[in-house]
Image (spheres, rainbow, N blue to C red):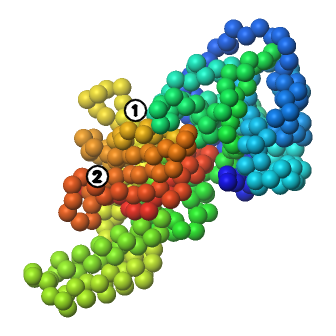
Amino acid sequence: MISIKKSLKSAGLLLVGTAGFLAACNKAPEEILGPAPITPSGLSIGATLTATASDSLFNRMVIKSGMQATLSNTALGYTLFVPDNAAVIASFGGTLAAANAFIASQSAANLAGIVKYNMIAQYLPTAKIVHPFPNMQMPTDIILDPTNPFIRLTSFPSKSGAAGATFYYNNAPLTATDAVVANGIIHHTAFVVAPSLKTLKAEIAAVSNLSYFRAAIARADSGSVGLGRLDSLLNYAVTNMTILAPNDAAFQTLIFGLAFRSYLNTRPMPYTATDTAVATATGNGAVAAGPAFLSTNNVTTAQIKGIMAYHFLAKDVSTNPAVPAFQPVYRAFSVNFPATPIFVQTLVNSSFAPHPGIRVSATYTGPLVSALTFGSYGSPTPAAPFTYTANTVSMDRLAINGVFHIIDKVLLPQ
C-alpha cells in the first residue's frame, strides 16, 4: 500500500511562509513549452472533474482547496495530473473511509499545496515528454516568490521505465494520458504526488538510521567553506541533486572492516589466530564507538570526503570537452533508471574526470522499480570492479532540492 499521509499533512505550508525558499526553484526549467493548438470548447478541467465519478475524491480536494474556479477558467491553460479514486484511496489509508477522513481533516491550504503541485500552467501533452534519464523539469503552480511568478516549485515528468515507454510524474506512473479539455490536458497518476517542504539536509536529519551518514558529511566538510561543504549543498535550496545515503548498518560494516584491516596491517604475515581475534575485537570496538568513530584519527578527512563525494550523482556541465566540470544538478527517481544497467558519474569525477562512476541496475515489477542496485568501483576486499553492490532499502525520498535513496552498503570509489 502506498502511504504518504505524513508528507501531505503540512503540504499547504508551501503556500505561506516561503521567505526562506524564495529561490528554491531548484534550477531553471529545461524548457518552456508554447501553447498547444487547443481550441477552448466543451468542459473545462474543473467541470470535467465534477462530471467524472471516478475522480470524485480528487475533485473534493480541488473544491476544498479553493482551486475549482481557477481550473474552470477557460481563459487559462493548464496540465493537471489527477489521481483517480483508487489512487487517492491507496495513498490515504487504503480504504474509502480513510481517504474521506483524511481529506476532511486537511485545511484548504494543505490541499491547495497538493493540487497546485499537480498543476503545470501550460499545455504538456505526452508527445512533449521525451526525456528518458533522468527526466525533464517543469514549473508547477506553486509560486515561491510572490514578487516573481517565475520562481516556482518544480516537478519532473519523464518517459522512462523498463521499456523506456512509460510516462511518469516524478515517480508516479501515468495510468491514462492526454485527455484534452477546454482549457488544457488531464493526465491520471497511479498515486497522489505531493511536494516536499524541506531541504535534503532536513529530510536526512529526520531519518534515524542515517546518523553515520550525517557524521560522515560533517567529517568530510572539515576545513571546507561555502558550497565546498557537502552539508551546504544539502541545505542549498537552489539546486537539484540525487544522493545515495548509506544507512547506519552499512557504515558499521565499513567501520568494522577498516578497523579490522588496520590492525592486521600492523602484524606480520601469516596472521595467527590471536591476530584475527584481536582484529575482530578492534573492529567491534570501533563499531561500539558509534558515529563518533568517523571524527577520530582512525580515518582521514580525505578518505571520508572521497567516499562521500562518491554518493552525490553528478554530470559534466562544461561546454568545453577539454575542461570537464562535474556538478550535482539533476534528480533521478528510481523509475528514471533503465532496466539495462548504466554507469552514472559522481562528484568524484570533479577531481578525477576519467573515473567510471557507479553502475546502476533497476529491476521493474510492472511500471515501478522493485529493486535498485548500485555497484561501486572499489571493494573492501579484492574483487573485480562493480562486484561490490548496494541495494536500495528506501527509494525516492523527495526533498525541495533533490531526491535521496537509502542504501545498505557504503560505496567505495577505489
Q: Say left or right for 204 vs 147.
A: left
Q: Nearer the viewer, residue 61 or 326?
A: 61
Q: Earlier in the sequence, mark 1 or mark 2?
A: 1
Count of number-bearing discs: 2
Q: Secondary structure at mark 2?
A: loop
Vertical side of 214 occupied by 260: above or below: below
In the picture of the structure, the residue carrying the numbered disc 1 is 317
* Quadrant where the N terminus is found in the figure: bottom right
312 or 81, which is in the foreground? 81
Q: Amino acid at mark 1?
A: Val
Residue 408 horizontal/vertical position (percent): 44, 62
Label 2 belongs to which residue?
386
User: Toward which corner of the image does residue 313 lie, by quadrant?
Assistant: top left
Q: CA distance from mark 1 to mark 2?
A: 25 Å
Name the residue located 69 percent from the left edge and 8 percent from the top edge.
37
Q: Is residue 152 visible?
A: no
The residue positioned 9% from the left and 82% from the top of the image is 270
Image vertical order of residue 298 relative to residue 11, above or below? below
Residue 383: x %, y % from top left: 21, 59
Measuring from the top left, give residue 114's x and y in whole percent. Answer: 76, 41
Quarter holding the C terminus? bottom left
Tell me which residue sits at (86%, 18%) in the image. Answer: 43
Asked whether the beta carbons under mark 1 and mark 2 sit within 8 Å of each other, the answer is no
